[in-house]
Amino acid sequence: MLVCDICTQEVSCEDDMKSHLLVAHMEQDCCCPFCTVAGLTYDELNYHIHTAHADALEPWSSDEEVSEGTAFSTCSSNNTPDKEPGTGNQEMTPEEIKVPQEVEPNMNKMQSSYKEEEVPRTAAPLCTILESIDSKNNSTFVAENITPPKASGAALDASESLVVDCPFCGEAKDSVEKLELHVGIEHADLLASPNKENARLQFECPMCCLVCVNGYILQEHVNLHLEENTAKLTSDSVLAIQLQAEEDKLRRAEDSEREKVEFQKLQRQFGLDHSGGYRQQSVQNLERAVARGRMHPMEFHMHKAEMMESLATGVDDGRTKTSGVLEALRHYYNTGGPEVRRVWLCCPLDHFSNSAGDKGWGCGFRNFQMLLSSVLFNDTYKHFLQDCRYIPCIPKIQSMIEDAWKEGFDPQGASHFNGKLQGTRAWIGACEIYCLLTSLRLKCRILDFHKPSNPSGTHPLLFEWVLNYYASDTRGVEGKVVCSSKPAIYFQHQGHSRTIVGIEERKNQSYCLLLFDPGCPSEPMQRLTRKNLDAADLKPLRKYTGGLKHKQYQIVAVEGILSPEEKAVRLQMSKVFRAERIP
């Protein structure tokens, strides 16, 4: 392949190159690179350069010196093999150049105008000069960039008489050699001839490797790719969204069904599933006992009659009550208990166990019965609670809590139970006990030991608070057994509640709580009323520091009587219920 030195177009043979030079360059106007002459054809420019600037036409190659007056090679000679003498690409002298007849008058006129003017010699061949003329962006390296020295009558040095400006950056050079060296170093990328490899690197599609003619076509081509991918992506996105929506709908349905089942389990667990209350459960358990042969039918009717009477009067039938346990404990500590240094006991109280009607959910109500029995044993509270001189049954306690809600106590708790406890098996906790006692004008405190106070996960601050509570009114009292006038303490943790009746200080300087558990049946509690107790009999009552492993405990303690004004204040405070948090 042959490459034109002027426009870098590739042609297949020498004849095509001649045709190309004739059509593309010889028939177009050119300008002289050494002076300001312009608007010439290729033959006129060639004749003008070889006559007016013959001294500037030195050979370009460094390995061959040509004397003055020797003809220069054509533009395509650098890219074609050497020719034999007399075969088309040999050198010609200016005299051998044939000038067309119509061009000769103009050439003679231009030659006469430069006859007396000396032109410095240069080493730039015409093909290189013309290549500079047709470089990037068609920048014209015209003769205005060359300042020919004026004739001064004295011979000037060629290196000092020629000033050439770079057509790309405007930097001035005093010779063509320096200018070409400067352009080759500083602007090599601008003079590089484009070829197929460069075009492929510059305009090759990154998505399908298609080679485009220019950057604009490449951009349009890539945009088509992107539009096609966007349409495909849109359809895929719609399908993905549909699948995701179906999956989300299925997951929501599964979650809803699972939440419904779990909620029903919670309702059954906390007695809010409308399966009946104390009365229904009592009758069902009695009938089940008769069916299994554990109860005689006559005994069934007696139990049912007593239950109906209890429900009618609102007073507990006392079938699960055990009295005298605290007196037996006092006798045990006075006569034995060598491992105990000192013990503090609350005022006397009765133990109430769960019955067939409240088994599994009535611990809070039974603990309230024990706490109330302790309050009624104290003369200070007994004369004050004239309207509550007897221990109420569980349905009656439910009714009393509903009355407290109607007064305005704990509206949040009331909304949790929908304002109704009677006829349900709903669990109650420390908040309901506090509201009920406050509605009876009993001054009480609710404390929340919301986290362990020891790194081992125990609650030593709870033991310390109970000790201070029972010892506050017995300071200065001597003896191993200290009987306090304080009532028992309601003791709640997750899933169960008990009653604190005292605390032991052991000889190893540790403490142990004494608890009445409503889950303990009446028969074992009856054995604790004996006079000859030993340490093994007290095991169901004792709880050491390491035995309380729940994260949170709550207690309700009675500390006095409220005036009507104080009750009104407590009523307003219960609108936003807050317990005392320790620690």
Image (cartoon, grey):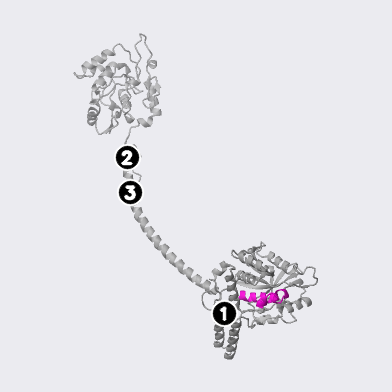
Answer with left or right where residue 351 lies relative to residue 176.
Answer: right
Mark number displayed over residue 392: none
Question: What is the three-letter code of the residue carrying label 1?
Answer: Tyr
Question: What is the three-letter code of the residue carrying label 2?
Answer: Tyr
Which residue was labeled with disc 3? 227
- Residue 203 in percent (x, y) is at 33, 40
Where on the picture, by quarter, is residue 341?
A: bottom right
Secondary-structure class at tag 1: helix
- Residue 240 in percent (x, y) is at 38, 58
- Residue 281 in percent (x, y) is at 55, 81
Q: Which residues are magenta?
A: 362-388
Which residue was labeled with disc 2? 216
- Separation of residues labelled 2 and 1 (CA atoms): 88 Å
Question: What is the three-letter code of the residue carrying label 3?
Answer: Glu
Q: Is residue 549 visible?
A: no
Query: Nearer the viewer's eye, disc 3 or disc 1?
Result: 1
Secondary-structure class at tag 3: helix
Q: Residue furthest left?
A: 101
User: Residue at (58%, 68%) from the top-left corner?
Assistant: 408
Q: Earlier in the sequence, mark 2 or mark 1?
A: 2
Which residue was labeled with disc 1? 278
Q: Is residue 520 above or below residue 100?
A: below
Answer with left or right where residue 20 lies relative to residue 242.
Answer: left
